[in-house]
Amino acid sequence: MSEKKTQTMKPATAAQKLGILLEAAPEEFQTAPVSRTELAALEANPPAWLVELRANGPHPKQVVAAKLGVSISGLVRGAVTEPLTSAEIQALLQQPPAWLVTERATQYEVREEQIRVKDRDAERARKIAHVARQAAQNEKAGRGR
């Protein structure tokens, strides 16, 4: 019987899963494949460099967008193309430029629409289920005669 091969991932994938910028990670992390076991260990007991990166950055665009409350496309429209540190993000939030105000409003509208559509779909599903139950009851009552 052969030994089970350890699954590994590229450092870029591991960095994405950890929510860090690969280029800011230590060289040994950037160059070696990461096993699922190693990733779980990093998440469970993060080393100092990982704690520091998560707290202060520089952060990848997904993290920057989330912290600013905008989409990644919103960052692009706002001409934010480089990773930002936590301090830079805080500065933007304290004195938001016009693009950030606009993008946050857009993101809010998108979320509201997603909620509206989800609620509408749930109501439709509830009505369909009700009609199906009634049809089944009517069919059962018709057979009982």
Image (cartoon, grey):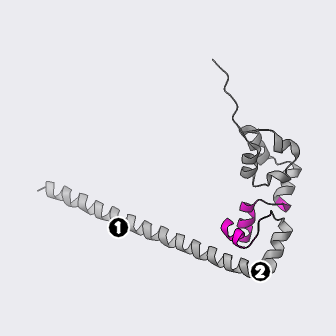
Q: Secondary structure at mark 1?
A: helix
Q: Secondary structure at mark 2?
A: loop
In this rendering, the count of numbered labels is 2
Q: Residue at x 85, y 50 (%)?
A: 25
Q: Which residues are magenta?
A: 55-82
Q: Residue at x 74, y 62 (%)?
A: 61
Q: Which mark is residue 127?
A: 1
Q: Residue at x 80, y 75 (%)?
A: 92
Q: Residue furthest top?
A: 1
User: Within 10 Å of the Cα at label 1, are there few (<14), some (14-19), or many (20+) other Cα atoms?
Assistant: few
Q: Residue at x 39, y 64 (%)?
A: 125
Compare residues 6 and 138 and report the one nearer the observer. 6
User: What x and y, as percent, mark residue 30?
Assistant: 82, 45
Q: Quadrant of the N terminus?
A: top right
Q: Which residue is mark 2?
A: 97
Q: Give the alpha-carbon distance from disc 1 to disc 2, as whole Å.
A: 46 Å
Q: Quadrant of the C terminus?
A: bottom left
